Image (cartoon, grey):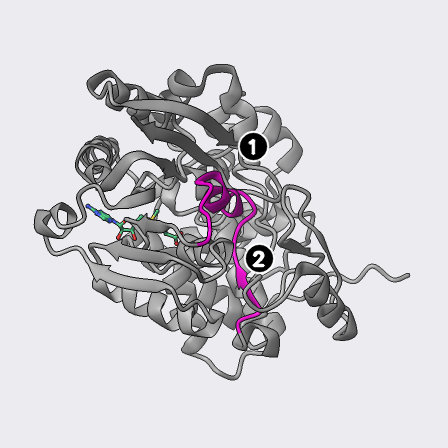
Amino acid sequence: MENRQPRLHKNLIEAVIDSLETIFGKGFYADKVIERTLKSNPKWGSRDRAFIAESTYEIVRWWRYLWELYGKSPSLKRNELTRIFGLWWRLNGQELPEWHGFEAVQDIDIKSAKRSLPNDVGVQQSFPIWFDELANEDLGKDWPIIAQNLNLPAELIIRANTLKTTRQELKTIFKKEGVETHNFSENEVGLIFKQRQNIFSNASFKSGLFEVQDGGSQLIAPFLRPEPGMKVIDACAGAGGKTLHLAALMQNKGSLIAMDVEERKLVELKRRAKRNGAHNIEIKHIEGSKTIKRLKDKADRLLLDVPCSGTGVIKRNPDTKWKIKPEDLEKVKGIQQDILNDYSTMLKSGGMMVYATCSILHSENEDQVKTFLAKREDFKLIEEKRVNPSKVSDGFYMALLQKA
Ligand SMILES: C[S@@+](CC[C@H](N)C(=O)[O-])C[C@H]1O[C@@H](n2cnc3c(N)ncnc32)[C@H](O)[C@@H]1O
């Protein structure tokens, strides 16, 4: 079969460069920037869109590695960004057209440039110097493989909404549509797509038969052991990824309070709950410590899916590694300990809570739980679990604690 080289189009490269300029120059989130770039030209077809999104994400992911290979310090000058694009293209084994702008990278001997790079994780796996040092200290011998796995492309995984369907039923529906999926081996509800695709326009999504949810994330709600009829609080519910899973596990029976400090996220949660047919959710915007105090000793189960560095989801959000700063990490660790101390008051005696993050770092995970337990003799650790990033999962940590 003829092995055809994909053709490059100047306007698409320009779109990638515009996106890189905004992501690194203005510090905007990559997913939002790409979304806006794609909206700016409705005439682009699906292949063009995929090209822009993939190229931008991959160049963001390999940013440090590419500049090291090029032998220069990162710059946001358009002519330099064009060369970085060219280098990335060549790294993928593709040939560059003889266009003005690519000359400087046209003749780089990629093999020998690769050989001359330092053999440390920060360069080889493209992480900032400070973060590589910190992760090395925090994770020790596990860091190199975790770093490597954080650069894997993210798979598309969904969770069957058992309030409306089963995994098997969903699988059959997709099969009829010509879409191949296979079971996520860690639970009874996850389905992995053979190929990434836009499934938000799919009729079964619109009727609430499934939610897109990472494999590791799907392990957190069951870890809390919620039961139908219980009073459950999801205190950092956001737009409700795990709230919806909790509602399904509770079979819509009992009460589920979803709280967050950001009201707009709760508005989105409400919309999703309606689509999912989840009827036992009560939304509560956290306006201050009073909201928490009013719920003292009320919960059988409490989920604290706390704000964190997001270092477990770098696979999905590669820009996180360039945005996060050491001082952000310190700040978020303070918030995590405050949430543990203040929100755990909502738990009844004998009740259980899960502290969870999407961070890979012990300092946000095991260490935080240890610090909390050292102060609180009325809590004990029942079980903790670390999910390392892999093809089917982001990096997560969860700890199940019980109140005496
Ligand atoms: C990791 S996200 C939660 C994701 C969500 N549970 C899900 O599954 O989609 C952390 C959430 O904590 C919220 N948050 C930040 N500070 C908070 C606080 N002091 N109290 C409660 N929620 C907070 C953020 O707005 C964010 O939605």
Q: Is residue 18 visible?
A: no
Distance between the alpha carbons at the discs numbered 1 and 2? 26 Å
Give me the disc on residue 11: none
- Residue that label 2 marks: 159
- Outermost residue on the bottom side: it is 43
- Answer yes or no: disc 2 within 8 Å of ligand 1: no
The segment highlighted magenta reads 208-228
Residue drawn at (72%, 69%), measured in percent from left and top?
A: 174
**The one of 309 and 356 positioned closer to us in this rendering:** 356
Residue 79 percent location from the top left of the image: 41, 56
Q: In which quarter of the image is residue 192?
A: bottom right
Q: Reply above or below: 329 against 291.
A: above
In the image, taking residue 376 as reference, residue 33 lies left or right, namely right
**The one of 60 and 270 positioned closer to us in this rendering:** 270
Amino acid type at circle 1 is Gln
In the image, taking residue 199 as reference, residue 75 lies left or right, namely left
Q: Quadrant of residue 133?
A: top left
Amino acid type at circle 2 is Arg
**The one of 92 and 386 positioned closer to us in this rendering:** 386
Return the disc, 1 or 2, that comes first in the chain's sequence: 1
- Residue that label 1 marks: 148
Residue 7 percent location from the top left of the image: 67, 66
Q: Quadrant of the N terminus?
A: bottom right
Residue 78 percent location from the top left of the image: 38, 57
270 part of magenta stretch: no
